[in-house]
Image (cartoon, rainbow, N blue to C red):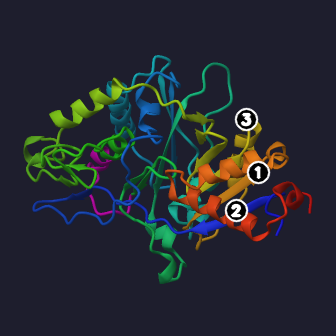
Amino acid sequence: MKIWAGLLLIAVSLLLPGCATPGGQPTAEPSEGDAGMVDFTGSWQPHLLYLLATPHPRLYVEVDAVAGCAPSDETLNKLREFLTTYCEKPDGIEIVRRPLISKEEARGLPPHALARKFLAGPPAGTGAAPAFMYLLYYDSALSEESLPAAQSGFNKNPHTDILPYPSIYMNVRYGFEKSVPDEMLVHETGHLLGLVSRKEFAAGHHCLDPNCLMNRTLRISLSRKFIGRHPTTQIQLCGRCMQELEDSLKLSPPMNLRYAGPVLVRSEIGYEVLALPNRVKVVLGDLTDDDCQAFASEVKAEAPRPSDQELRVMCVVKPALRQNPAALREILRRAQADPQACVRHVASQLWQKWQQQQPRTPVEMAAQ
């Protein structure tokens, strides 16, 4: 197996995160699973790319939607108001609706497969590159159509992914009244902005204040139809959540994270981690803009498969590094201690292949 001359492709499973559950009175049961919600610490602080003016002084929000699932102008206006309130983007915030995805194109494809196929990213242009935020509105009934029951187990709750790629998935088939998705979108966007990562008065990345929009359960106001009240009993963020955002705005910009078009890039010593929805590419060696563009093109060109709900990890060793066995060995050792499990896994696989083929050097293996 010529692992140093090409790509090593590994598929691993990832439990997708659940999020808040909208319900009437009494409250609905909370959704299951927060495995994809992570603490914003160390090398992983993508929320700061949205909140801070550096390194991205503007924000580009892409909204993809299956026909019949598109959010209203009012919903997106509430999103814009929320982002404008808390994000420091001196060059502006742009929310762009993409052309609708037809029901025929969406039929039988889970949400991450739809995202990979239709995500476009910000257009190339002059000026500073924007931070990129992705939203997908879909219908789980269409996504599940013709799928065997064993393959339809994707997360159907409106939810936010933080790992491996920050993004929001809004299932319009989920059981909430028509007016509640406005609040649900603000809730999910709050997660992208780093809420609720604190340890105090929080559980499962949700606020314990029942009157806060970041509470796990959104409670429908039963009296609103009669007296014109807000559709949910939660009207705004609580003081703790607002303080959490204010504290984040005082932090230094992340030195190792940036967006290159739609690709989220995490830079470590000797290697780079590129991410798109449920796709990760580890580049050992020096990264170029062409590498990011190639990764985006590779992911978009994939033939969508209904059964493909797993995280897939690719790894490539740049040619220059293959000529330096000592440096490559040190980078592989470092990558095996990466904060992200899938990166550790692929680095370990490469390391094992190398060890099995000793005493040959990586240069000799690359030349095969």
Q: Is residue 133 visible?
A: yes
Q: Position of residue 12 (x, y in %)?
A: 56, 68
Near mark 3 (Cα within 10 A), the count class, few <14, some 14-19 or many ≥20, is few
Q: Amino acid at mark 3?
A: Asp
Q: Mark 2–mark 3 contact, CB under 8 Å?
A: no
Q: Mark 1–mark 3 contact, CB under 8 Å?
A: no
Near mark 2 (Cα within 10 A), the count class, few <14, some 14-19 or many ≥20, is some
View extreme (right): residue: 368
- The residue carrying mark 2 is 350
Q: Secondary structure at mark 2?
A: helix
Q: Is residue 161 above or below residue 250?
A: below
Disc 1 vs disc 3: which is toward the camera? 1
Disc 1 versus disc 3: distance between alpha carbons?
A: 16 Å
Q: Amino acid at mark 2?
A: Leu
Q: Mark 1–mark 2 contact, CB under 8 Å?
A: yes
What residue span does the magenta drawing correspond to?
172-184
Q: Main secondary structure of the magenta part?
A: loop
Q: Position of residue 92 (x, y in %)?
A: 47, 21
Residue found at x 92% / y 63%: 368
Q: Secondary structure at mark 1?
A: strand
Specify whether 116 is left or right of 201: right
- The residue carrying mark 1 is 317
Disc 2 versus disc 3: distance between alpha carbons?
A: 25 Å
- The residue carrying mark 3 is 289
Residue found at x 22% / y 37%: 241
Q: Is residue 282 visible?
A: no
Residue 175 among magenta residues: yes
Mark 1 vs 2, N-terminal side? 1
